Amino acid sequence: MAGSPARGAIEPLAPDLSPYAGELEQRGKLLYKLLAFFLALSLVPLMVAGFLLIHVGNNIIQKQIIGVKQEIAQKVASNVTNYLEDKRNALQIVHKSSDFLTMDPRRQSEILSNVMNAYPMFMRMTVIDLNGAEVSAVNRMGGASSEDIRHDEMEALRSIRSLGDYIGPVSRSPEGYPQMTLGVPIERIPGRPIGVLLGVVNLIDLSSLVKDIVIDQKGYCYIVDMQNLEMIAHPDINTLLSTTPPPEIQALKTLREQNHDVFEGNQADMGAIEYADQTNTYLASYATVPPPLNWKVFVQEPTSEAYEASSQMRREIAFILIGVLLFTTLIGYGMSRFIVKRVHTLQEAMEQVGEGNFDVPFVPTSNDEFGSLTDKFIWMAGSLKDKTLKLVYAQKELQKWNSELEKRVQERTRDLKEAQDQLIAGEKLAALGQMASVVGHELRNPLAVMNNSVYFIKTKLGAAAGEAGLDSKIDKHIHILENEIIKSNAIIRDVLDFARNRALNAAPRKIDELVEKALERIQFPPDVVPAKKLTLGDLEVPVDEDELRQVLVNLMENACQAMTSGGTLSVGTRTYGDMIEITIGDSGCGIPQEHLSKIFAPFFTTKSRGTGLGLAVVKKIIERHQGQIDVQSKVGEGTQFFIRLPIKGVTLAAAKKSVEKA
């Protein structure tokens, strides 16, 4: 099917799909779902196999790396054993010679000197008898025997008597080099020693031995006496001679503190450890020098270098997996795109139908399930078009009737509201008028009698006092009575004014003159200054002079009362379109915002005394003149009242209507 979208558009019933736009957008992910399905189907097994391969390969490579370094450590340990065995054999050869067995000190010294020349690593050779007395001695550095040397000789003598050959603990030469004492018994008859041959061996050659071992770029080998945690051999001679423990020894101490059994059990003779210092993490494989020495040979290098082959293997496998992922993604994307493209074509046609365009563009069909779905959709679009046209006509008719009904309901509601307001206002005013009449009659007569009585008392007391005059306290209380009577009459007048229903006596008057006359009636406090800006001139407006004067005087007096600390009473007039505007403002305390909406309500007041009818009477008078009154106020800055009256005045019909409402 093909056609113009405008010709088949049905605007009135076009559905608003905006609330569902986000949901449709979230659902329109078939391409990604198919792609994810293909990727999961092909890549999950591959990824699992790849990770297993990486894990297994990594373990095998690391074991091989550790094994190679352990073999190196074993080889070095074997060389250390051979080195010490060679020095002990030298002692065995010496003490078995016939010239040496004579125990002739001179002859023994000659032999020992020759041996020391042949073996530079011997620093001292000594012969002692079974009593511990020194028979002969040759010292490469010269000097007499020290207390430490004598102590070693005694230990060697005791050991040889009970165990045979003697291997002493590692000690330090005066220069700081590691050394140890080897001893063999001097026997003419096997099993019956006649003395002991001791040789102090400098172990510096072991450092040369480990220095020649090169392991990658940063790997090296060193030997540690595990009994005292002391460095025996190290490729760096400064580290060997340092008086402070090197990092390797500190790391071994920390490992022992954390795990006392770290070099026990299966890990006693051979194993591997990892430790970290402030700059790097190291892998150290170790092997044990055979007893009786408690030495271990460590082959150490940074883990980043040691496991480089493992890291390289992981990177290569990762690159292969990424390549397979990209290839599979491209293939899956192509297949998914082919399937989703036809779904998108049908989806676009559905969106046009949803927007009200039932003449959908051409949608390709096929002989598969997609083709059947397309034929059903085209049939549905035609059926929807016919039914929608009928619904549109019915909708227009319904809207027409709804509009007329709504208009009528609004008119009737407005009329009922006005009638209800008029009825309520009439009932209130009627009740207030009856109450005002009763109150005015019942209170004004007693107030008049009280006023006459006060006048009589004042006159009699004044005559009796003569020239001395009235007592000040009596005169004060008489004035209080007179003022309270005046205030009570004012309250009665406000109530009667608000409830009064007399006709409006409107006549043309000059507004500026009325404002001037109102100002003349105001008794300004000493610190209140009036400011006038009257611009109407001779313009006359039909108003009830008495009522408008009452409005102006009331507002001006309120303004003066608001300026308790003095200020300016501003009064102005001007034209305001087809109306005139009278502005009365003060610089007093202002009115809080929460009270502005209530100030014109009857009986509302914030003063300690008063009826709250002053502004209600003002508003009533202005409305009787078909005018408006507005107020603007800000606390601490002052208040302004705006009175607007029509220039043409109040019509007779409007005046009568205002009386009826009142």
Image (cartoon, helix red, strand yellow):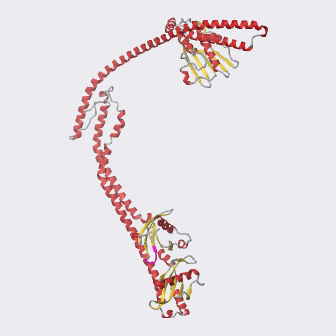
Q: Nearer the viewer, residue 255 or 188?
A: 188
As drawn, the residue found furthest toward the left would be 367
> Which quadrant of the structure image shows residue 590?
top right
Magenta span: 290-296
Horizontally, residue 448 falls left or right of residue 646, namely right
Q: Where is residue 104 in the image (x, y as percent from the top left)?
A: 54, 93
- Is residue 122 visible in the rendered image? The answer is no
As drawn, the residue found furthest toward the front would be 464
Q: Nearer the viewer, residue 498 or 23?
A: 498
Compared with 127, 177 (above or below) is: above
The rendered magenta stretch, by its main secondary structure, is classed as: loop
As drawn, the residue found furthest toward the right would be 467
In the image, residue 392 lies in the stretch drawn in magenta: no
Compared with 482, 225 (above or below) is: below
Q: Residue at x 50, y 92 (%)?
A: 100
Q: Which residue is drawn at 43% across and 71% down?
A: 286
Q: Position of residue 206 (x, y in %)?
A: 49, 77
In the image, residue 293 lies in the stretch drawn in magenta: yes
Q: Residue at x 56, y 83 (%)?
A: 150
Assign the N terminus to one quadrant of the image.
Answer: top left
Q: Which of 206 and 379 is in front in this view?
A: 206
- Is residue 324 visible in the rendered image? The answer is yes
Horizontally, residue 504 falls left or right of residue 461, namely left
> Which quadrant of the structure image shows residue 469?
top right
